[in-house]
Image (cartoon, rainbow, N blue to C red):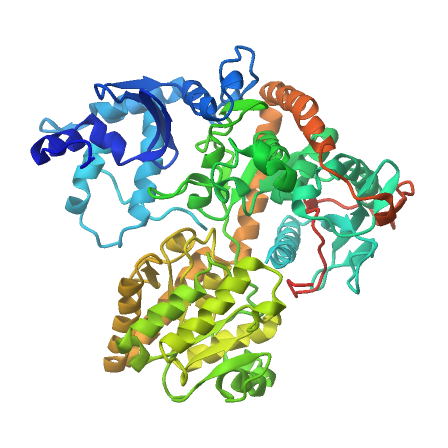
């Protein structure tokens, strides 16, 4: 703006006007002289599109369709101008769980009528419709969740007035935020326990049945991935069912990348249905999909069987790869994003309900786009233009955060339950001065508290950033030692280019800041039980856990650490910002501001030196937060309640559901199927002749039947690397 407008006063007037409002909310710009089109996101989930004439700075509002066409002109001008280009619009099927919006209008009118001596209460005319009030309430709740509980109303009164709120509301409060294989298996155990408890309370003499459906891999390489049926450890009524991928009557023998699974999913689904109908002697009550491939398989199964479906995305790829939609032709040979984005859009619209771990996963934050929100509108030039892919305010969205296995991750104070058999190995891991394949570096002063972090060694997890923060901050180095767990020490042992670069960078930081005697680097650890005890041993030193990721979708290690009683400092980018109430149950740190973050940690440990009770306070508050919101018991209760509610809702809205289902089937048959056929399949040498689906071992008639679909290999082991 400085290069465009020289006069400071004029520049200030422009920035304080409409153009300024647009400027600070811009997500993306597309330039086709003399116009520039902007994609604007004033708040999470809210989108506007404008076109600015660079000659006179005039601003014109445009539709999502117009913006996508404008953007397409850069990549495929013929497609952008094709009057018959395929447009996908799921917005036409939006409907409310609680009936028509008009039926709730009297409530809005009542709220508008409230006043005290002429002063408006509750809401003002800005929120004159039910839809506007719904959206404003969501925005306000997210905003308040990031503030300390004792924040005075005066501190955010202006923002509330701009959104349409007046005095008179009670506290809105915090939002109800109530290794893939580990997640699914812990989920199964929690769901089975909750089902057994409900059945007992209802006086029923039946047993639940849960089947985890995944892929059978003949070339299992020493794992159980070639075993069709396997019991799940720690459960009585849950099993893993593995079904192989096959195509053209031949079975795929080896593992295949998640980007290449699409040609196999339809036949896989057909084979799975045959198996589960025999195993369960009837249809399941609920099917839960996991990840893109599992969610599409669950969609096909739910449609065929006419049962309630839930989906869990875990991680949607679209936000990870910039401009991957408009550049899909360039990226498709490697990633097959055309298949993936179609599959994701189909599944999230077909499902009865969606389970997310955090609000940010759905609609993001003020600074960052939500994973689901990125599918609101996008374009694949030459293929289709999605003008309304998903509505992030759809009542099908639910937040149910997972917990940590409390038989593994429990408070350090529970001395009788501690895994003391690991103590000699952990002592060696932390303090031995021997350099080997498991640990390098050493800690000279064993009496100092330890700050600790454990993650994959990639750029986003930011372990190198934490190491640099520590190296630069002399005050922090004087107060604590640093221990990180992740990756290899030798870059040649890694097959990942990003990890290799991070390994090299840590070695450089050790030398640059002369960290010997204060820094310990431990290779990646896979034993859950020992890791749980490692957290507790760090707590014994009166240390803390630090999660410095540039972005973290959820933050399971944050849950694990807090569950063990460790005060926790975690990134303010993503899920941890919802898990931790800043300054009460832990601390938010900005991964982009290392100096500020390291000083927050230093301040904490300086206060602990003066007042030992300060450490205990945050340890206890962290545990309290976890027990109130982040346990598998809470999760299972929520998910089963959702299953009941949405099954009822499914019956209540059969006609609307059927209309949308027909639209989805058309999109699947006319678009996705053709795209999937273009994904290369391995040569015949890597395949074996397929046998017809055979009946599995029969069980007695059971009720409370759940299917968890995940086409990536799953074992009952607790080792996530198996």
Instruction: From the top left corner, tell me how far across and down residue 123 is, in percent.
Output: 23, 29
Farthest residue toward the top? 83
Instruction: From the top left corner, tell me how far across and down residue 14 is, in percent.
Output: 16, 29
Residue 424 visible in this rendered orientation of the protein: yes
Instruction: From the top left corner, tell me how far across and down residue 577 is, in percent.
Output: 37, 54
* Picture layout, residue 417 above or below residue 152: below
Instruction: Give residue 183's quadrant in the image.
Output: bottom right
Instruction: From the top left corner, tell me how far across and down residue 698 is, in percent.
Output: 87, 48
Instruction: Give residue 475's quadrant in the image.
Output: bottom left
On the rendered structure, is 61 left or right of 182? left
* Picture layout, residue 343 above or below residue 410: above
Q: Quadrant of the N terminus?
A: top left
Residue at (79, 41) in percent of width and height: 272
Residue 413 visible in this rendered orientation of the protein: no
Instruction: Give residue 452's quadrant in the image.
Output: bottom left
Q: Quadrant of the C terminus?
A: bottom right
Residue at (50, 51) in percent of width and height: 401
Nearest the camera: 586 or 99? 586
Residue at (68, 21) in percent of width and height: 670
Nearest the camera: 400 or 633? 400
Nearest the camera: 162 or 209? 162
Tell me how many marks there are.
Answer: 0
On the rendered structure, is 289 left or right of 516? right
On the rendered structure, is 255 left or right of 531? right
């Amino acid at each position: 703006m400085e290069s465009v407008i020289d006069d400071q006063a004029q520049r200030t007037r422009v920035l304080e006007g409409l153009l300024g409002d647009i400027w600070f909310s811009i997500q993306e710009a597309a330039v086709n002289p003399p116009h520039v089109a902007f994609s604007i996101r004033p708040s999470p989930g809210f989108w506007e599109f404008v076109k600015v004439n660079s000659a006179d700075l005039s601003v014109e509002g445009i539709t999502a369709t117009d913006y996508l066409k404008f953007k397409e002109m850069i990549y495929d001008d013929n497609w952008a101008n094709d009057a018959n280009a395929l447009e996908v619009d799921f917005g036409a099927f939006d409907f409310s769980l609680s009936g028509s919006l008009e039926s709730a209008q009297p409530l809005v009118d009542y709220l508008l009528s409230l006043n005290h001596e002429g002063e408006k209460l509750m809401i003002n005319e800005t929120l004159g419709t039910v839809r506007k009030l719904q959206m404003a309430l969501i925005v306000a709740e997210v905003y308040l969740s990031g503030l300390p509980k004792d924040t005075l109303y005066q501190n955010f009164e202006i923002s509330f007035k701009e959104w349409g709120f007046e005095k008179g509301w009670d506290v809105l409060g915090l939002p109800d935020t109530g290794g893939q294989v580990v997640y699914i298996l812990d989920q199964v155990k929690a769901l089975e326990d909750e089902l057994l408890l409900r059945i007992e309370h209802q006086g029923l003499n039946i047993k639940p049945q849960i089947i985890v459906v995944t892929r059978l891999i003949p070339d299992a390489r020493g794992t159980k991935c070639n075993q069709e049926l396997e019991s799940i450890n720690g459960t009585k009524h849950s099993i893993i069912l593995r079904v192989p991928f096959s195509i053209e009557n031949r079975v795929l023998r080896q593992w295949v990348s998640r980007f290449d699974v699409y040609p196999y999913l339809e036949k896989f689904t057909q084979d799975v249905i045959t198996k589960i109908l025999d195993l369960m002697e009837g249809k399941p009550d609920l099917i839960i999909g996991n990840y893109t491939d599992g969610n599409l398989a669950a969609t096909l199964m739910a449609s065929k069987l006419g049962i309630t479906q839930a989906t869990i995305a875990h991680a949607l790829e679209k936000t990870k790869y910039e401009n991957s939609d408009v550049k899909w032709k360039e990226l498709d040979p490697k990633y097959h994003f055309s298949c993936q984005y179609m599959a994701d859009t189909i599944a999230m619209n077909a499902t009865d309900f969606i389970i997310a771990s955090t609000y940010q996963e759905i609609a993001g934050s003020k600074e960052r786009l939500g994973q689901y929100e990125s599918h609101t509108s996008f374009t694949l030039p030459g293929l289709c233009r999605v003008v309304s892919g998903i509505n992030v305010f759809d009542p099908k969205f639910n937040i149910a955060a997972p917990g940590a296995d409390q038989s593994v991750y429990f408070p350090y104070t529970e001395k009788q339950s501690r895994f003391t058999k690991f103590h000699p190995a952990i002592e060696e891991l932390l303090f031995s001065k021997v350099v080997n394949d498991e640990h390098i570096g050493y800690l000279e002063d064993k009496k100092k508290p330890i700050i600790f972090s454990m993650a994959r060694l990639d750029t986003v997890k930011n372990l190198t950033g934490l190491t640099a923060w520590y190296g630069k901050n002399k005050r922090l180095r004087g107060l604590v030692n640093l221990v990180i767990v992740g990756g290899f020490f030798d870059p040649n042992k890694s097959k990942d280019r990003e990890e290799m670069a991070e390994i090299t960078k840590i070695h450089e930081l050790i030398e640059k800041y002369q960290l010997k005697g204060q820094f310990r680097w431990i290779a990646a650890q896979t034993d859950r039980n020992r890791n749980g005890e490692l957290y507790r041993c760090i707590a014994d030193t009166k240390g803390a856990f630090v999660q410095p990721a540039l972005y973290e979708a959820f933050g399971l290690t944050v849950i694990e650490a807090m569950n063990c009683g460790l005060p926790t400092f975690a990134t303010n980018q993503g899920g941890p910002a919802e898990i931790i109430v800043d300054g009460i149950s832990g601390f938010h740190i900005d991964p982009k501001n290392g100096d500020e973050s390291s000083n927050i940690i230093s301040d904490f440990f300086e206060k602990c030196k003066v007042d030992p009770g300060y450490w205990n306070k945050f340890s206890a508050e962290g545990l309290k937060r976890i027990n109130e919101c982040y346990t598998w018991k809470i999760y299972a209760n929520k998910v089963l309640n959702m299953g009941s509610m949405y099954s009822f809702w499914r019956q209540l809205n059969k006609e609307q559901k059927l209309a949308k289902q027909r639209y989805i089937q058309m999109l699947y048959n006319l678009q996705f199927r053709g795209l999937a056929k273009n994904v290369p399949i391995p040569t015949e040498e890597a395949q074996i002749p397929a046998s017809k689906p055979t009946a599995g071992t029969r069980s007695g008639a059971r009720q409370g039947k759940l299917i968890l679909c995940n086409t990536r290999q799953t074992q009952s082991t607790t080792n996530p690397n198996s």
